[in-house]
Image (cartoon, rainbow, N blue to C red):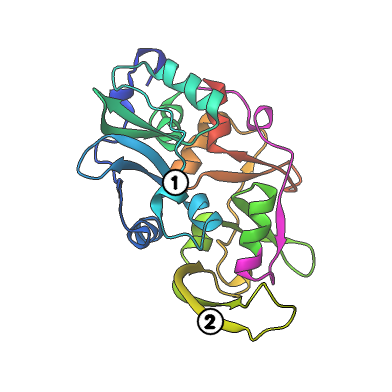
Amino acid sequence: MMAENLKVSDVMNRDVIYAEVPGSRDEVFQTIKNKKISGIPVVKKGTKNIIGIITREDMLKHSDEDQLALIMTTKVITTPSSSSIIDCLKLFKSSGYRRIPVVDDGELKGIITVGDIVHKIIANSNLNFQVKDFMRRKIFTCWGRTPAYITSRMMHYANEYVALVIDDEEKIVGIISNTDLISLGEMRLEEKKSVLKSGSESQEWDWETSTVLYITKNKISLPNTPIHQVMSTPCITINDSASIMECAVKMQKYNIDQLPVVNAKDEVIGMIFDIDLIKSL
């Protein structure tokens, strides 16, 4: 496929999963968890009018919030189905977003993702740029015995959604992503106690009365399971001299968004993500 000749309608997914506001946070969590998707658009209940988007990162970041309106990202970039893929690529590159809802006449008609571009266009191209020209030198790692909930917090602080896992001998033994972490998540009832005291302000000493409030809410909770038990292993890699097309084919084959990059000595020297590949177009 030549990107220059394509429109968004040629590549987008028409059977799009979406959430409604007001709606259930728990249902959205289960959808993202069970279908292993990175995010879904949010529409106003009873309509197809898009008002936001909610991602797995949003769910983990706001794990104790149960209102979708307070979890979702309200800044949404959309594209019409008639737009060219070239214009859509400009949106992906300028925004850094991984998914763009397709909207016609104010209604949600589908969604187009970075994965769609990589699998349907780049994997079927003859692009011979090398991986080393687009890879990232920064590598985020975690020790294999780190608990899942700690790993999630570390990734949040580092603004990363994937980490290479190293063992006690400093060897890379696997990879873990937010998709893996959220699959471990469970809804747990959390109770907090608050004590409110009241007394007379007119006297220095007085009897005080206390009111005890118990506040309960469902929270997305991750276990203390060490990540070496849930990571993806063995770690699938790509050589730095491989072509961008070969990289896209491997991502499509294994249904993954990223690959560690190795040199001729099989040493990990970087990472390449699917969103990096679209820079070649």
From the viewer's perspective, tell me whether residue 110 is left or right of residue 154. Answer: left
Magenta highlight range: 127-150
Q: Is residue 189 above or below residue 132?
A: below
Work out whether residue 1 or residue 63 is closer to the camera in this orientation and state it.
63
Q: Position of residue 14 (x, y in %)?
A: 25, 35
Asked if residue 148 lies in the magenta stretch, the reply is yes
Asked if residue 68 lies in the magenta stretch, the reply is no
**Residue placed furthest toward the top:** 4
Q: Position of residue 225 (x, y in %)?
A: 59, 75
Work out whether residue 46 or residue 116 is closer to the camera in this orientation and state it.
46
Determine crowd level at label 1: few under 14, some 14-19, many 20+ residues with C-alpha closer than 10 A.
many
Q: Is residue 63 above or below residue 10?
A: below
Q: List the residue tagged with mark 2.
A: 212
Name the residue rendered at 33%, 23% in the picture: 8
Q: Quadrant of residue 277?
A: top right
Q: Amino acid at mark 1?
A: Met
Q: Quadrant of residue 192?
A: bottom right
Q: Is residue 7 above or below residue 26?
A: above
Q: Position of residue 71 (x, y in %)?
A: 46, 50
Say which label, 1 or 2, has the lower sequence index.
1
Q: Quadrant of residue 32?
A: bottom left
Name the residue rendered at 62%, 39% in the picture: 272
**Residue placed furthest toward the left:** 46
Q: Amino acid at mark 2?
A: Val
Q: List the residue tagged with mark 1.
A: 72
- Note whether residue 123 is visible: yes
Q: Is residue 37 above or below residue 229?
A: above
From the viewer's perspective, tell me whether residue 81 is left or right of residue 149. Answer: left
**Nearer the viewer's eye, disc 1 or disc 2?**
2
Count numbered badges in the picture. Answer: 2
